[in-house]
Image (spheres, coloured by chain):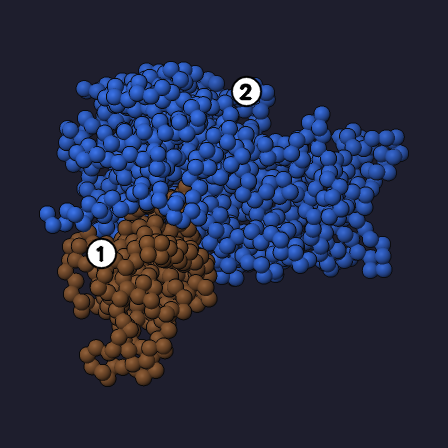
Amino acid sequence: MAGVELLSDQGYRVDGRRASELRRVQCRLGVLGQADGSALLQLGNTRALAVVSGPHEIRGSKSKALHDRAVVNCQYSMATFSTAERKRRPHGDRKSIEMSLHLRQTFETAILTQLFPRSQIDIFVQILKSDGGNYCVCVNAATMALVDAGIPLQDYVCACSVGFVDETPLVDVCYAEEAAGGPVMAVALLPRSEQVAFLSLDSRLHEDHLSGVMKAATVACRDLHAVLSRIVKETLQEATAGE
Amino acid sequence: MRDNHASSFRVRQSPTISDTVQRIDQLNFSFQLFPAIASYLHHFRSCTLLGKVLGADLTHFLTPDCSVALHYLEVLELPQLHGVLFTHTAYQHVQHKSRRLYQRLRRLLNSPRSDCVLFANEFQLGAYVDRQPSEDLVAWQARSVYHAAVWYYNHLSKIIPVVMVTVDSAVVEKYGSATEGVYVVPFQAYLESFWPDVPEASEFLVSLHQALTAKEVESCRGSKREFAEHLPVDVLEAGIRAGLYIKGTLSMNKHKAHVEAFVRQPGLLSKDTDDVLVLGIKNRNRAIQGDVVAVELLPRTEWQGRSLTLGDVGRDDCPQEESHGEPMPTGRVVGIVQRNWRDYVAILPPPEEGPTQGRQAQRLLAVPWDFRIPKIRIATTQAAMLQDVRIVVRIDSWDSGSQYPNGHFVRALGKAGEIETEVAAILIEWGISVLPFSEAQLREMPTDSPTSPWALDPKEVARRRDLRLSHLIFSIDPQGCEDVDDALSIVQCDGLDSTIEMGVHIADVTKFVPPGGPTDLEALPPHTTSADRRFDMLPPVLSSNLCSLRSGEDRYAVSVLWQLDKETYEVKDVWFGRTVIRSTYKLSYETAQAVIDGGHIEIATEIPELSGTEDEQQARLGELRDVLNILTDVARAWLCRRTAKGGLQLEGSEVRVEFDGVPGTVSGLTPKKALEVHETVAECMIGANAWVAQHLCKSLLGCTLLRRHPSPRPELFGPLCNAAESQGFHIDISSNKALSDSLEKTKDHGEPLLSRILRMLATQAMSNALYCSSVSVPQHDLKHYGLALPLYTHFTSPIRRYADILVHRQLLAVLAAENGDFEDPEVMLSSTSLEEICQHLNERTRAAQKAQKDSVELFQCLFFRDVNPGIEESSTDHRVADALVFAIRANGVLVFVPRFALRGAIFLKDKEGRVARLMADGRCDFSHGSLIHKKHEIVSQPSDGQPFVLHLFDHVTVSFIALHTTWRQMAVPLHYIFHAIIAFLICSIFTTTWADLKYL
């Protein structure tokens, strides 16, 4: 195979991480004043802005309303400047639609929707910088925005992608690793109960390696959970100290 | 313009140092950068993380900059240089510039012996420097390497100086005296001042430098194209997938290296039908033996057949008419998928023949030892010193504008013709590296010295079955053998069910060689023997002491014990396990045979273990004889049963080389004499191997290492059937049983050698036995064709073969599992890794066999050289021997010389197309005429003489002269043709042997 070596003999990945290391996580809550909840989350060089509004009345056609729970409406988009190649991405493109669907599925399981019958919760996520693991960053950002909005959740939803190179699972793959075309598994986990909210796998992975990859993903998600919950606590402490 | 912003962060986003640092703050999960670096140094041995510890006697670290790492990597590879610290910057530079060199660097860094380590400076906060705007790449790389060196020096508390070497004088000027303790010196000056006792390093540097400058000159000159350009990699890959091109390994025809080459597709077994013929240098398009290439088929009208003429190493491109076989797919090379260049042994031509005597007198064409390799153009100033010296060269490149590849001189091996040089040459040609055992390996070994003798561990003894008192154990090996890895025992049980217990005891090497340890890793390449020396796989403390089952000493063993029926010798029960044994007798084959043959008390002197009074000796000798007799009976019965199932008894032509003490000379060549006891011992070992293989496969603990011998391809039996037919025998090759039976029938023929030669031809038709993993091959292909066994493995020589060590581990794991003890599942390798190991073992075993064969040929040549001191003066003192014709070719015959177990070709047609003529005194010369080639005979019809006929299995008398040619590819000098009337050529290392021929 021509191309870069994703895992060197010394155990370094292209960006200098070890196989089980996550990228640096930065997150700010409440970045937009006019929204009910918002969060700006950056994982390495992938940055996403999530905005949550709701729960509120159903907008548009009332027929969409569900009598026993809230409707979760997700919209995913990528900024034109988010990738190396500048590209206009109208909302209708297939990838975005798919990603929106995935996000909706993920959060329908996590949000306690039955508390808000006949209402709607909107989650808008935009990728500002894309460097691999877009879905996972979106999920994490959306979780933080939901927390900021005060919408009751079963648990944090932490997502992490795991690649597989040279018999080794690589946690939190960056763009270079994603682009190499190996298997990439994206897992969204409710870390405390270890329930899987979402799981997707691109390209083929031998069954023998599945458990190893899943394990690496679980550990990574729990690590992320620790970071995210600490950030939430710190933000709350700052907020209460300021008052 | 719009993309500027976006792309700039894409570039920066990979190894951003800020990420690395803050990651430590935020997620400090597994950040081990600091201890990992420290571990490279001896002082920090406590935190060995990557397993590499630089020697305690290290005086400084050597840090090459990017261009040194790229261009002079081979100098840094020298084992004499210690403490080489590659920076990640240089590493990436090499990766970027050349994939071949990058692989080399990786191998170097991964090799457990080299003292080279990688410092990931670009992932290290303190060591990383950002590239400034408008700073050019080279300047940044130099700064980065220097900065890393400084950081490293400070990190090691300034204990050890760091030397950065470069070839750029500007760098020396800029950084030379910037920091105390970190020196920046030119590479040449560094080698001269720091390694004055390693002159080859600076010579090597000069040679590489010359090759580099020569290349630059070449590229400036821009000569006309000799070859078509290779297609780019992506086009090739697409073409191969689409079926436009065929991908395969190029192999040259040994006899027609200049004309004929074949491309063998991987995975296809049938050698003859699916090969693609590549004719001529132009079509071969710079591909070299062993390269993986892509070929394009030519139109069907241009297809040609393979040549059937007897080839001669010396004579190439004979313009005479040649006979060709059926037209076969013919193609031309369009691109090279993977180069498989290695080190080549070569020799420089005499100066007056130097073809490039124009502007650059020091650019020479080195002639490789292997005649399948093209001449290599090297640049050297030492041409005069290197006359008649075998040198090692490496190929650097082969441009389409150049007729020959460019290479560089690596080192000199020694004068051509000396044993040491020639043996070294053989080893290099077959890629066998013989290195002394490393310090890490020796540290791992148990000690056994007079002051602290090694002793059994009582705990270990308790875990094992103790056979020291209950069993009479003895070993039978060649005279003077030191690494005894197998011993035998026979115990007669006089119980109700009267049985015989026969045991094979194999040294328990795995006890001392833990998996994954340095010895284990280094043992992978197999042990090799040359006729006069041995290269051990294990350190001597194991191979000739603690694992050698010497008589009178307690040793750990792994035993196979069979309960045999007293009458039929059927196996009733078998036991495997770890034991403690003490061998009573260490016999040689000859003494053992003498004991069996009923030799009396005089043998006792040959067996030092038989001490005591005469009566005692007599009694003990009697006991030993009984045991040996039973053993022989059992082996006979087993062999008989195996032969009945189709086991083949094949004939290899092996000779023993005798030395008479004078270094560098051979005193005799004797065909190996087979005693019955050889067969007996071999049969016992075959039994042990087969039973172990069966036991391993019965258990379901994953995949097993087996040895399979595929059925031969019927088309290869042509020469055998043809030869047998000429004597009125029919050879049935439908199965191994049929083959064995029909070979057996030929024994009745009046010619005693017939059967032997037919068996030899049968051996040639056999495919090679291979190591394989039990799950990678269908069950019915696991069988061993030659031995007629359904399952076979290698278990009985763990001191000499790595496969046996693996099998020992697997057997012990299986036995442990049977006792409900799954403590060590690691040894059951996954199927892919076992498959890889098997591939590697097969390759290395093949190389070792070839090297061994070459070395035997070398000694044959030395022998004929030494017995013929006066070849220059006359042709009368040739050694003369009887030989038998065993195959007929278009321009000559192949003969076998039983006395020296030699095979060779006799040409009946010389270079000018003249044919052999029989003279009145029974000698031959060449004159004009024609040659008629039939199936079982060849007729030479000189225009002015009697025609004569040579039939298959005719006796001829041949004589040998060792022709002292120093380089292999040289054409046969004409003046020898006057001496030698009909040529008899041994395919040899450096000598060609001629013979004249007389009819009886």
Calculate the distance from the C-alpha at mark 2 to the C-alpha at mark 1.
78 Å
Of residue B945 and residue B593, the one placed in the foreground of this image is B593
Residue plotted at (35% across, 44% down): B22
Residue plotted at (49% across, 55% down): B831
- Where on the picture, by quarter, is residue B59? top left
Disc 1 residue crowd, few under 14, some 14–19, many 20+, Cα 10 Å? many
Residue B827 in picture, x, y percent from top left: 57, 50
Of residue B630 and residue B125, the one placed in the foreground of this image is B125
Please state which of the two labelled residues, at mark 2 or mark 1, is closer to the viewer. Answer: 1
Q: Chain of mark 2?
A: B
Q: Which chain is blue?
A: B
Of residue B600 and residue B472, the one placed in the foreground of this image is B472
- Where on the picture, by quarter, is residue B917? top left
Q: Chain of mark 1?
A: A
Disc 2 residue crowd, few under 14, some 14–19, many 20+, Cα 10 Å? few
Element carrying mark 1 = strand
Residue A155 in picture, x, y percent from top left: 41, 66
Of the residues shown, which amino acid type is indicated by label 1? Leu
Residue receiving disc 2: B663
Q: Which residue is outermost to the front?
A: A243
Residue receiving disc 1: A128
Residue plotted at (32% across, 52% down): A26
Discs 2 and 1 carry the same chain letter: no
In the rendered image of this protein, does residue B606 appear above or below residue A186? above
Disc number for residue B76:
none
Number of numbered markers: 2
Element carrying mark 2 = loop
Of the residues shown, which amino acid type is indicated by label 2? Pro
Q: Which residue is outermost to the left?
A: B1
Q: Which chain is brown?
A: A
Residue B156, visible in the rendered structure = yes
Residue B479 in picture, x, y percent from top left: 67, 32
